[in-house]
Image (cartoon, grey):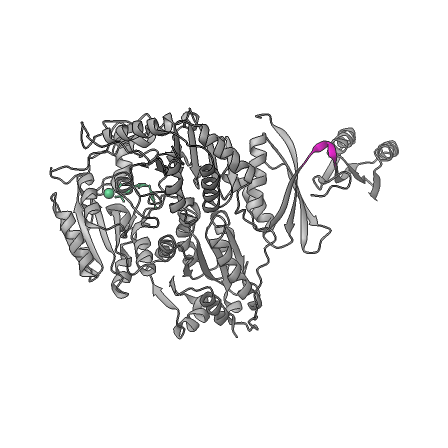
Amino acid sequence: MDELRSHIISAIVMHRPGVLQRVAGLFTRRGFNIDSITVGPSEQEGLARMTIISTGDDKVLEQIIKQLNKIIEVIKVRDLNADGTVTRELCLIKTHATSERARSEIIQYANIFRGRIVDVGPENLTLEITGTPDKIDALIDLLKGFGIKEVARTGPTAISRGSKTI
Amino acid sequence: MKGSQAIIKSLTDEGVDVVFGYPGGVLLPLYDVIYDSDLKHILVRHEQCAAHAADGYARASGKVGVCIGTSGPGATNLVTGIATAYMDSAPIVALAGQVGTSMIGNDAFQEVDTIGITMPISKHSYQAMEPSEIPQMIRSSFYIARTGRPGPVVVDLPKDVQEGELDYPENITIDLPGYKPTKKGHPLQVKKASDLILNSKKPVILAGGGVIHSDSSEELKHISELIGAPVTTTLMGKSCFPEDHPLSLGMLGMHGRKVSNMIVDECDCLIAVGCRFSDRTTGDVTKFAPNAKIIHIDVDPAEIGKNVAVDLPIVGDAKIILSHLIRVISQSKSHKTHDWVDYVSSFRAKCMPRLSFEEMPLKPQQVIKEISEAVTDETIVTTDVGQNQMWMAHYFTSMNPRRFLSSGGLGTMGFGFPAAMGAKVAMPENDVVAVCGDGGFLMVCQDLATVKEYDIPVVVCVMDNRYLGMVFQWQKLFYEERISHTKLKAMPDFVKLAEAFGVNAYRVERPGDMKETLQDALKSGEPSLIDVMIDPNEILPMVPPGCGLTEIVGEYKVERENPDEIPYRPSAKETGGD
Ligand SMILES: Cc1ncc(C[n+]2csc(CCOP(=O)(O)OP(=O)(O)O)c2C)c(N)n1
Ligand SMILES: [Mg+2]
């Protein structure tokens, strides 16, 4: 019961100004932890899907879901079970890459991780990678040796496996 | 028509007959329409009072109260009242002016982010960006404010939106796919609850403000008599159950009645209806109702399990669920709690709090006793916040729902008087008495001008102790009598203050005078103030913060040491056949 766990919360909300503020404000006001939050249009016009990653025990999770449901512009909320969920994050990484050797190594890593080089400069390479947050962490770790200049991550978004919808 | 006309039409269509407001630059278009509309507008003297008056109007009548403030400082002055209504689930709609849409975000003159500021203290809020949005927004605001768990809704109205043209639609549909409050309780949960109740030997009902909002006092009385369960209330629940009823225990909690605190500690089944287990009600939650299975009935699912672990939740409207429970329980065999009811009534008789004091300076208990004698069951009393509030909550006998109004959740000093004003406007046939502290009343005393101008005959009783009494009490009890800034050294002569506003005023100093003075003031049919000089050193019974409910500090003075009250026994019929 009191065990802290990471939860993936998926919410369908009205796509209107101020909704993100209401949701984010709720988390700060009630002291809920928020690891990441992503929003984008959903399959239905006028509705957006929000994916929130939060850490807390079961009681906190229950409160998060109930409190989210109280927001008038929140239409549906579900705690996605980690096993039955596809989770993906997009990340752009700009690294130092001056020597030929560094460049070819970085390109090889990118290939292994099914990433792509999306920008090349005389002193840098920018990689794009999509995957689970763990996979992205691993790639970032590997690239640290070359000198990372910038990382931009979207935060994870998620959808349940199979025909189930929220 | 113009946006401003649409606002007034929408309000009128919602059945609004009166609004409490204060104009300003961006509200000129709206006030220009109010100028020749039938809608009654009451010009308060501070926007906070507009919000509290709308709140008092709502609490007294069950209808949605409306307040209006201009952009910037007008809106921020409404904030305390909106937060007060939010904490106590009072249905109000707050209309705020806003700078023109093209100026928003530029730090224009008198611009504040009203929506942002009120987001955490309102049930919902809207900002109109087009005149055509107004009819639906206002319709939805009223719908949201009064349904489900009621609460305040804020509507932000930029000046150009008030001025723009729209076609007022014939039909307005409410489209709120994310808002569907549950009404009916789950039948299986109701069945389980009835089993729990029927298997209990010592049931107690804890009734909160939800009983009043859902208008279920009748059902509450019925079920308590049916199952032989004494009823205690939260501060917000006070008045939902007649406090002279043999099964009434009075208020529970930090300043609760001894009998309530002790009996909740002992009960084996606590049926909580429409309450949120606030820390002021429960004391230390780990010691709360330690022997009881807890059933929690509430319309707001988020309240279930929030503060107290619950054995059996039922989400829905209290009226519907209580009637359902009554039906199910009535079908089953008798439920005998006679021993428990006898035990509770003899215990109750032994700890009826002492009200009668002949000494001078006047004891607050004696004042409350005389107030109780001067009013009727239909009199609406409001309280301010502090000792005055807790004296009323503890000692005043309240009989009917919506007749005891108090700021419970936010504990807003300055609530009592403007709330009384709103209540009187809503219920002109009922007498209205505000019991205030001298500190709290001074925060809103400028609105004596409002009750004078509009002839709103409320009677304000200022419990004059020349102290911020409640904080003073805590300093005495818990801070080694270090009396830091709670003595009100320079205070006005309240009689002269009232007279300066043209309001009748009286002063009461001795036991026996309060009753008659209050009756005279009520009979006068004019707004009045009674300055009641009381003993500042009387300590309220209390449970220190962090303690369990049975750990009441100090002596609990009782009216009679050897009571001869006849134990109450619900009739065989009431208990479902014997
Ligand atoms: C607006 C506001 N400010 C401060 C407080 C904190 N507070 C709670 S009770 C109290 C004392 C109230 O004094 P008074 O109005 O004279 O009432 P009394 O307790 O003496 O009856 C104070 C300062 C509050 N509840 N509300
Ligand atoms: Mg005082």
Up/down of B551 relative to B89, above or below: above
Counting from the top left corner in percent of width and height, residue B195 is at 49, 31
Q: Where's residue B126, x and y in %?
A: 53, 57
Instruction: Compare residues B574 and A59 and report the one nearer the observer.
Output: B574
Q: Is residue B308 visible?
A: no
| Rendering quadrant holding ligand 1 | top left
Residue situated in front as seen by the camera: B544 or B158: B544
Q: Quadrant of the C terminus of chain B?
A: top left
Number of numbered discs on residues: 0
Q: Using the rendered image of the protein, determine whether residue B177 is visible from the camera's viewpoint.
A: yes
The image quadrant of residue B52 is: bottom left
Front residue of B574 and B171: B574
Q: Is residue A83 magenta?
A: yes
Q: Quadrant of residue B225?
A: top left
From what the image shows, is residue B227 above or below residue B31?
above
Image point (70%, 49%), residue name: A40
| In the depicted structure, whether residue A97 falls above or below residue B530 | above
Q: Position of residue B479 (x, y in %)?
A: 29, 29
Q: Quadrant of residue B171?
A: bottom right
Instruction: Read off the magenta span.
Output: A80-85
- In this picture, residue B423 sits left or right of residue B82: left
Residue beneath the point at 34% across and 43% down: B241
Residue drawn at the location 11% of the way across and 38% of the way down: B358
Q: Nearer the viewer, residue A109 or B178?
A: B178
Residue B469 rendering spot, x and y as whole percentages: 25, 39
Q: Is residue A45 magenta?
A: no
- At x 46% / y 50%, what residue is drawn? B150
